[in-house]
Amino acid sequence: MATVTEIASGVYRINVVLPDRPVSYSLFLVDDDSPTLIETSFAAVFDEVKVAVESVVDLKKIERIVVPHFEGDECGGLNKFLAAAPNAVAICSPIGSSSVRDFTGKEPVVISDGEVLTTGSKKLRFFLTPYVHAWDSLLAVEETQGTLFSSDLFIQPGHGKPSTDEDLSEQMVDLYKRIGLMPSMGHIRAALDKMKGLDIKTIACHHGSVLTGNLEPYYRAVWEQDFTGLPGPGAYSRPNFMDE
């Protein structure tokens, strides 16, 4: 059953644990005048996620559903949420818009880099972060409380506590190295540079515990350690046609 934890005032983590998966899956609910979901998780877990969301807010009142990138664990349940919340619209990046439009049959709200949407008392600022880890990726920051919705950035393995102030940066880097989730250090650094100067107090990541306390080790690890890509399957020989 999906669990619900308030991680900041009016901001909720909804977490799902699936058997035999190395990570847990979280989505986030901003309960405000315009209730907003960030991520949906898989379509297969919609029923338990729906119960969790409705423990906080009437699902029909959801107005926005943020798609950080087009992938099953991020937005697989999008159509089910749109059907249950008839006034809701999907929010996505320009690159992701064609996939979201085709998947839902509805026109999404296409966000621009640095754009701010208010939910009432809270403000969501969006950053386009291509190739972190998908080509259509975006991140969002709730500026009034300093909550970064980091999607697949700053994730950790396992099914840990809802939130932690422990330093799990080594586990994070090890996971990235094992699964090859991030294709480009340049794009990661560009994303971090966009967030420079923001007063981030909480990192709400899609996999693993929400991070609080001293966040410097995480920033330093993703800036300094190259964990991008996967090792190739072996040695290669030069193809003959390249000598022609």
Image (cartoon, helix red, strand yellow):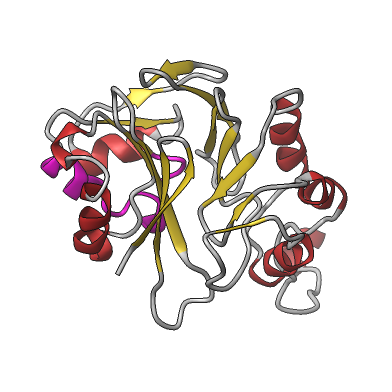
Q: Residue at x 76, y 26 (%)?
A: 196
- Return the x and y of residue 99 as percentages of the image width and height: 34, 40
The quarter of the rendered structure image containing the N terminus is bottom left
- Return the x and y of residue 217 as percentages of the image width and height: 82, 51
Q: Residue at x 41, y 18 (%)?
A: 121
Q: Is residue 205 above or below residue 197?
A: below
Q: Is residue 53 above or below residue 89?
A: below
Q: Is residue 109 left or right of residue 51?
A: right
Give the magenta-colored segment's residue range: 67-84
**Residue 193 visible from this viewpoint:** yes
Q: Residue at x 27, y 34 (%)?
A: 101
Q: Residue at x 40, y 50 (%)?
A: 27
Q: Residue furthest right?
A: 224
109 in magenta: no
- Return the x and y of residue 225 as percentages of the image width and height: 85, 55
Question: How many circles with numbers are drawn on the protein?
Answer: 0
- Return the x and y of residue 124 as percentages of the image width and height: 48, 24
Q: Is residue 117 above or below residue 219?
A: above
**Toward which corner of the image does residue 42 lie, by quadrant?**
bottom left
Q: Is residue 146 left or right of residue 108?
A: right
The quarter of the rendered structure image containing the C terminus is bottom right
Q: In the depicted view, which residue is nearer to us: 215 or 206?
A: 215
**Toward which corner of the image does residue 190 lie, by quadrant?**
top right
Predominant secondary structure, magenta span: helix
Q: In the depicted view, which residue is nearer to us: 107 or 122?
A: 122
**Residue 244 visible from this viewpoint:** no
83 in magenta: yes
Q: In the depicted view, which residue is nearer to us: 181 or 242?
A: 181
Q: In the depicted view, which residue is nearer to us: 21 or 231?
A: 21
Q: Is residue 93 left or right of residue 219?
A: left
